[in-house]
Amino acid sequence: MRCGHCRASITEAIATLDERAHVHVNLESGEVRVDSPSLAPQQVIDAIEELGFSVTGPSTFEGAGR
C-alpha cells in the first residue's frame, strides 16, 4: 500500500461489507484499522486479500469478532 488509490480501495471494500465501519489506512506503516459493530476479523482479512494485498494478521480488532 503506497498510494491514495490503495487507501480508497481498502476503505471501499470494507464499506461494502459494513457501511458503518470506520476504516483507517496508514500508508506509511501499511496498517489498517477497522472499527465495526458487525464485521468479524476474517471478513476484513478476506476483503483486503481479494484486492491483492497480503495480511499479516490482526493484532487487535474492534468489532463483532472480538
Image: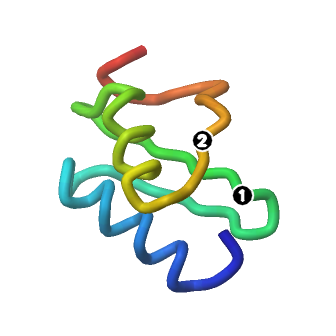
Q: Gap between marks 2 and 1, in whole Å?
A: 10 Å
Residue 30 got which mark?
1
Residue 57 position, x and y percent, is 61, 30
Nearer the observer, 54 or 36: 54
Residue placed at 51% from the left, 28% from the top? 61
Location of mark 2 (residue):
55
Up the image or down, 65 lies above or below 4; here it is: above
Q: Mark 1 Cα within 10 Å, few/some/many (few <14, many 20+)?
A: few
Q: Amino acid at mark 1?
A: Gly
5 horizontally vs 47: left or right: right
Q: Nearer the viewer, mark 2 or mark 1?
A: 2
Residue 29 position, x and y percent, is 80, 58
Q: Are marks 2 and 1 in contact (CB under 8 Å)?
A: no
Q: Mark 2 Cα within 10 Å, few/some/many (few <14, many 20+)?
A: some
Residue 32 position, x and y percent, is 59, 51
57 horizontally vs 22: left or right: right
Residue 16 got which mark?
none
